[in-house]
Image: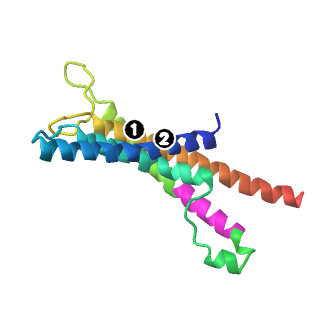
Amino acid sequence: MTLHRLALGLGRITAWCFAAIVLIMVYEVVARYAFNAPTTWAHETSILLASFGFIFGGAFCMAEGTHMRITLLVERRPGFARFSDALSLLAGTVYLGGLTFAAWRMAERAVWRFSLNGSWDPERSGSTLNSPLPSYLKALLFIGAALFLLIVLRQAFQLVTSRSERRG
């Protein structure tokens, strides 16, 4: 499976995450106000689903070619498009490289934690549910940033090789 297909598949899954958030919030409101029985899981589950969507949304948009662009100069000066693409891919590589590295460091500290007796003890939310959600989200952020970075690097490689093919 190519990186683009992986990103597109994850993007389509994340669209359903937002639909699930709506259903969860409707359930929470009805449970809380109609039955005076609020849930302990709705808030954290919604955070997980929304985070999943935002984490993989950038890679999805980049793979689909719908990432936001400012086209004012590109439309007025057609020769500027290639420079603009190269500049944005370079900036994306620098930013996503730093984000991937930082996300790895955060995920490593959050996920690989052990208590004194040797049992696995990932970072927890501290809420009533006290789920290990923060550690999972940090690991997902690393995966999402790495996927986004790989897609940007692939597009940069394609930009460079398409230029050299025209010369040859």
For the stretch drawn in magenta, the main secondary structure is helix
Q: Secondary structure at mark 1?
A: helix
| Direction from residue 116 to residue 47 in the image, left or right | right
Question: Which residue of the protein is positioned furthest toward the right in this rendering?
Answer: 168
Magenta range: 82-94
Mark whose residue sits in front, 2 or 1: 2
Inspect this view and state whether residue 7 appears. yes
Question: Which residue of the protein is positioned furthest toward the bottom in this rendering?
Answer: 76
Q: CA distance from mark 2 to mark 1?
A: 18 Å
The quadrant of the rendering that contains the N terminus is top right
Q: Residue at x 27, y 23 (%)?
A: 120
The image's mark for residue 158 is none
Q: Amino acid at mark 2?
A: Ile
Q: Residue at x 33, y 30 (%)?
A: 112
Inspect this view and state whether residue 106 appears. no
- In the picture shown, does residue 17 fall above or below 68? above
Expressed as whole percent of the image width and height from the top left, the position of residue 155 reads 66, 52
| Direction from residue 134 to residue 130 in the image, left or right | left
Expressed as whole percent of the image width and height from the top left, the position of residue 95 reads 50, 57
Expressed as whole percent of the image width and height from the top left, the position of residue 128 reads 14, 37
The image's mark for residue 139 is 1
Residue under numbered circle 2: 13
Q: Secondary structure at mark 2?
A: helix
Instruction: Work out whether mark 2 precedes mark 1 in sequence or the reverse, and give the earlier one.
Output: 2
